[in-house]
Image: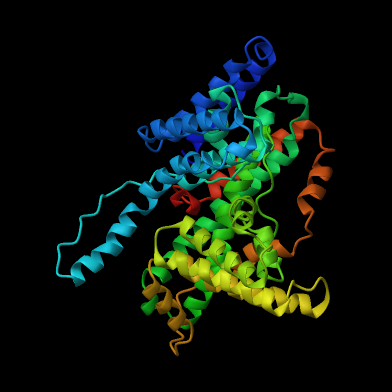
Amino acid sequence: MLFPTGAFALFFLVVFAAHWLLVRHAFRRAPMADRAMLLGASMVFYAAWDIHFCLLLIALGLWAWWMGLVLGALPQAEHRRLLPGAVAGPLCVLAYFKYADFFIAEAGGAFTWLGLEPPALLGVVLPVGVSFFVFQALSYILDVHRGDAEAERSPLNVLVYICFFPHLAAGPIVRAAHFLPQVAQRPDASRIPFVMAGLLIAGGLAKKLLLANTLAVELVDPVYRDPAAAGALDAWLAFYGYAAQIYCDFSAYSDMAIGVAALLGYHFPRNFDQPYRAASLSEFWRRWHISLSSWLRDYLFIPLGGSRGGEWLTRRNLMLTMVLGGLWHGAAWRFIAWGALHGGGLVLERALGWRGSKVGWRRWLGVAITFHVVCLGWVLFRAPDLASAGGLLAAMVSAEAATTATLKLAALTALALALHLLPGDWTERLEQALGRVPAPAYGLAFGLALLILLTLGPVGVAPFIYFQF
């Protein structure tokens, strides 16, 4: 089930009404009723893709709950012998569904070289959002281990945390220490940020339907499908166009997820902060997919040793973290190369002592360099394989100037990238301005905006890019 569809709108209206009715009339006497409804709604949401994987979600949530109870009942000193097994459960789920066929295929080359019959692929079907809900389960187990979250007695609370439908398919990755206390409290309808939620949802719809989908269908997909047939202008526009597309697509999902959760009384942290205005790669990763980059920092980079073991070990830990982060995105060499590019860039910045200037021409130079390094990484990220990535880069420097790109596509790309030039607090300013508008007028304007966006958008809605992860 996709956010920008009529089916989701009807689904959410039912969930919204049922949730607040239960909160108002039954929460104090039977708080589990509302949580059970939210879990059931999340199962319906996920079953729209494949009902069979709902069992996987429940099993993973129960594993995390049980491991949390076991770790919570033991002194911290005794966690070391149990923690590897506790995290192995979710990691095995991720390894099987996401990487089994990749490693079998890679091993097949060695079998062929030895003159042996290569093993057959398993044909594993990848569950939508598997990386996200596995990381949610790991977050709960690790937060209990570290003492950042209390072990939950109720399995229902843990299942709601892992399966909550706004962030289930593509994040943000919400920490257990941040979300579980909200589950335990009674949501307060008087504190719903209706204006901000409406802005996030409407803005997300605009970015997805008008920008990301159009750039994908009319520019990026055709060029990446056959880069050898693209002229230099087409290749360059696709180079920048995919940077615009992936930002609009992924930030749109995050914005809508945050807005939908807010309407139900739950707060998610911000996931994007104008990442293309970063003046260094380290700043970029503080602005792009913030929930993942902070997760990798806290649960991977720091446990590896962080920056505590000297300069060489710090650089090793940076590279390992980014390569594993690339592998998290997909079982393919292009994702490993993408992670290695970012890891190498972070190591180089550290060696040069570059942290990104705050003001002046040095900052703008840093922004330009960082943006083009990121765009180069997006070529590896988007291309179906390394050969196709090389084909696009070759087309960019070819003498062929014929182009099928249009002024509309160039303008949409420029518009998507220009969003990063707005003041950093422009949504807060707009929220304050709209907060003075009477609620009925705001509601009418919001409804008209949704209707216009759905009318102007293309027929059918492509899945969000990060659903595949």
Q: Position of residue 74 (x, y in %)?
A: 60, 31
Extreme-front residue of the structure: 77
Considering depth in this image, is 52 or 60 the residue closer to the camera?
Answer: 60
Considering depth in this image, is 393 or 386 the residue closer to the camera?
Answer: 386
Q: What colour scheme was applied to this rendering of the protein?
A: rainbow
Q: Position of residue 137 (x, y in %)?
A: 53, 39
Q: Position of residue 115 (x, y in %)?
A: 14, 69
Whether residue 253 is visible here, answered yes or no, is yes
| Residue at left offset 83%, top offset 43% | 432
Whether residue 11 is visible here, answered yes or no, is no
Q: Quadrant of residue 283?
A: bottom right
Considering depth in this image, is 152 or 402 the residue closer to the camera?
Answer: 152
Q: Position of residue 271 (x, y in %)?
A: 65, 50
Extreme-top residue of the structure: 29
Horizontal side, residue 367 vs residue 95: left or right = right
User: In this picture, is 31 found above or below 455?
Assistant: above
Considering depth in this image, is 110 or 81 the residue closer to the camera?
Answer: 81
| Residue at left offset 42%, top offset 47% | 94
User: In this picture, is 10 found above or below 361?
Assistant: above
Labels in figure, total? 0
| Residue at left offset 64%, top offset 37% | 76
Q: Quadrant of residue 386?
A: bottom left
